[in-house]
Image (spheres, coloured by chain):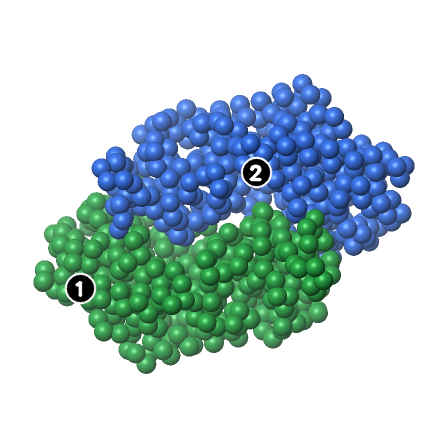
Chain colours: A blue, B green
Amino acid sequence: MSEAWLDAQARARIETPAVVVDLDRVDANIARMAAFMAERGVALRPHAKTHKSLEFGRRQLAAGAVGLTVATIGEAEVFVDGGIDDLFVAYPLLVAGRKAERLRELAERSTLAVGVDSAEGAAAIAAAVRGASRRPRILVEIDSGGRRTGLAPDAAGELARRCRDMGLDVAGVFSHAGHGYAGPDLRPAAADDEVAALTVAAESLRAEGIEPVVVSAGSTPTAMLSARGAVTEERPGTYVFSDGIQATLAGEPLDGVALVVAATVVSPGAGRGFVIDAGAKILAKDVAPYLVGHGTVLGWDAHVGRVNDHHGVIELPDGAPRPAIGEMVFVVPNHVCPVVNLVDEYLVTRQGRVVDRWPVDARGRNS
Amino acid sequence: MSEAWLDAQARARIETPAVVVDLDRVDANIARMAAFMAERGVALRPHAKTHKSLEFGRRQLAAGAVGLTVATIGEAEVFVDGGIDDLFVAYPLLVAGRKAERLRELAERSTLAVGVDSAEGAAAIAAAVRGASRRPRILVEIDSGGRRTGLAPDAAGELARRCRDMGLDVAGVFSHAGHGYAGPDLRPAAADDEVAALTVAAESLRAEGIEPVVVSAGSTPTAMLSARGAVTEERPGTYVFSDGIQATLAGEPLDGVALVVAATVVSPGAGRGFVIDAGAKILAKDVAPYLVGHGTVLGWDAHVGRVNDHHGVIELPDGAPRPAIGEMVFVVPNHVCPVVNLVDEYLVTRQGRVVDRWPVDARGRNS
């Protein structure tokens, strides 16, 4: 199956480690999610922090997405500069100083929504955009069980009212069911939590006389499970490529993932196995209790058991087959988002051939 | 102690999350290691994969370092372009195609040494540099107990002889005692292992009639403990900044670390505590069995217990003091190398004031 990733000619031309994307698989992932949401009548606003790329973002919009989701003002700036200007910053922004100025500038040249989960965050946004020619809509973040950011669902209305009193336009509520990542069997319950919490939150806005136009749920594991009831919008991100975590949660084979790290076997290793030139500086260090190690080596029934910055160490039982030193292998990363953020470009392939190189436009835009 | 990091004026001007360096502390770290090695008569060749920066590299050379260590050809290219041209790529290179051409070009314009731990790697290097105007010296990598890359120490001579037979100039041997990171009490034994293994390896070269001019040990936890006997060179990297792992291994206080991540409290959090805008995309995800969580929040007796891409979640006991929403906090990362690799610039400070911004010149040079 490694052959399917890059043919001999492509292998001879690329330098490892590198991030390789199969564009046919990406297009299929984009089409599948878009069709599902269209059939449900739910808006799709993919989270672009996964790909950080104008090219992939444009493909999502062409397939029917209403806009993109981002995590930071810096990511939003990159997409607006590239002509994608309907954006939701799904993060409880707390702006000050230069960042407040940037928010105002961004709002004036885009169709922007931003998150809040505190009166302090709302007040800072209100101060930043006062008198601006265009101002961002507000979505109140609620916690649906992920225990990260967000208010209790029934507290959304009160914060929405305070936002309105500050002169802000509240468009609705949003949540991220992070607990859907906890294990393969937990996705349906997390999706139920998300729908239930968003329903309560939407009602609490109505109780304050604020109609929630947007009721937004977000996460790839739950996207197809929570697109119902009060939910008007879904924000999955990782589905565009998938990765070890997503495929395992969904019960799908790893060799269907659309993005791999190409690596070279550089050493026989001091233990039993081999060592590749893909370590934490391209695979990152995300782990999950339902995955083994730091990535799966396709075609070799092997996992990257240990990573240092530039080394991936694979241990094997005695006598197990292994690639030759100098051979290229392909690793499915556990979590694709940090992998993309560690490189400057994608090698874009179709049917084993490199057809293009696309920049990771918003790489490192942390603020 | 947070006040010591950035004064009020600097806080108002920076955007979080950001990597902040205290230059006085860095200079003290550089001076201390240089003085120690000078007193021992051991050459210092700092590993630049930590800082990836011409400015910090120049300071190390000015303090007496004989050159720099890097992990990839790409990192070496950046330093040579910047005028730092005595470099050791401490990695078992396996070059092919364009990467082989780059190695040849690099060798022709620098004083270069590279690692090998296999005949395949040596043959590829020999082919790449055949007939070049200048060629890299070879250091044979041996395993001193880290169980990553490198040959058994007594096998170094045979590979050195094969390298020589391929026309390569073997300068010596090197090792990395990665097992010195396993715990605070394990550093002396790891250093002993390193010295013992390098001594055996050097002898095995002599048995083949090859005098090892360079016998190079490398890791910050063991650097000051293994600079003795057969060892002629040390390659510590992380000492330039230190981090949670290094300080804990050395029994030093965390508030003496020279690099922190400045973050803003963005949310009261859905649990008990608070949430900051520094997550895995700036703190990375390195953990250690002797550390709590993903970083330490200075001045608040708190650890970043959980990170997502852009969220750091801090949980606190009921009633524990906590920073206000919107307040800036400073986090000591567990492992500084991946943190630096996630940002484009350092905010360089002295006595709480930002005095410069330096690029992370070799960020992302993975190949």
Q: Do badges 2 and 1 share one subunit?
A: no
Dots 2, 1 in contact, CB < 8 A: no
User: In the figure, is residue B61 to the left or right of B311?
Assistant: left
The residue under the point 67% across, 18% down is A39
> Is residue B96 among the parts visible in the rendering?
no
The residue under the point 26% across, 51% down is A270
User: In the figure, is residue B360 to the left or right of B107?
Assistant: right
> Is residue B158 among the parts visible in the rendering?
yes
The residue under the point 32% across, 33% down is A300
Between A320 and B346, the residue placed more toward the observer is: A320
Q: In the picture shown, does residue B313 fall above or below A47?
A: below
Q: Residues within 10 Å of mark 2 (few under 14, many from 20)?
A: many
Q: Residues within 10 Å of mark 1 (few under 14, many from 20)?
A: many
x then y, percent, for residue A230? 76, 28
User: In the figure, is residue B233 to the left or right of A176?
Assistant: left
Q: In the picture shown, does residue A18 fall above or below A27?
A: below
Residue B200 is labelled as: 1
Chain to which the residue tagged by mark 2 belongs? A
Residue identified by numbered label 2: A181
Q: CA distance from mark 2 to mark 1?
A: 49 Å
Report helix, strand or loop for mark 1: helix
Residue at the far bottom in the pictured view? B39
Q: In the picture shown, does residue A14 fall above or below B315?
A: above
Q: Which amino acid type is marked by label 2?
A: Tyr
Chain to which the residue tagged by mark 1 belongs? B
Residue at the far front in the pictured view? B318
The N terminus of chain B lies in which quarter of the figure?
bottom right
Quarter where residue A2 is shown: top left
Residue at the far top in the pictured view? A39
Q: Which amino acid type is marked by label 1?
A: Val
